[in-house]
Image: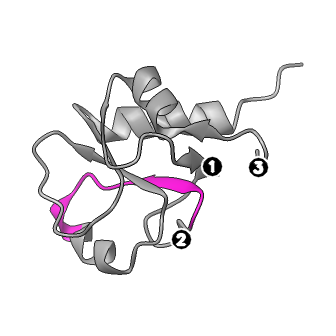
Amino acid sequence: MIGSGKSLADLAGLVGGRVVGDPEVTIEGVASIEDAGPGYITYLAHPRYRKHLAACTAAAVIVSDGFSVPVDLNLLRVKDPHHAFAKIHALFNPQPSY
């Protein structure tokens, strides 16, 4: 749904999260951590995927409150990254109604 971007601060309000970094960065969609580029938000819920952070070019990454991130990225810290990503995914990819 490109063209209907939301600020990271808006998304934090939607999921009850806390922004670390630029709250005004615009998010245009969601993607996996391997595929997320500028304008996209992704999430990291398991430490085994931490290796992808070094090459991550996403606009922001959803992580749990206690998750340590060794790189300088915009973060959305939440209690449950899976749930937050699902809510944000639904925002950018609404189900069609018939």
Split into 4 quadrants, where in the image is the C terminus?
A: top right
The x, y position of residue 43, in whole percent, is 37, 52
User: What residue is disc 1 on?
Assistant: 29
Q: Residues within 10 Å of mark 1 (few under 14, many from 20)?
A: many
Q: Nearer the viewer, residue 88 or 96?
A: 88
Q: Residues within 10 Å of mark 3 (few under 14, many from 20)?
A: few
The question of residue 22 being in magenta is answered with: no
Which numbered disc covers residue 74? none
Q: Closer to the camera: disc 2 or disc 3?
A: 3
Q: Tell me the quarter of the picture where residue 42 sits.
A: bottom left
| Residue under the point 42% across and 22% down | 13
Q: Tell me the quarter of the picture where residue 64 sits.
A: top left
Looking at the rendering, the stretch of residues picked out in magenta corresponds to: 38-48
| Residue under the point 53% across and 65% down | 36
73 vs 24: above or below: below
Q: Amino acid at mark 3?
A: Ile
The x, y position of residue 78, in whole percent, is 26, 34
| Residue under the point 12% across and 57% down | 68
The mark that comes first in sequence, 2 or 3, is 3
User: What residue is disc 3 on?
Assistant: 2
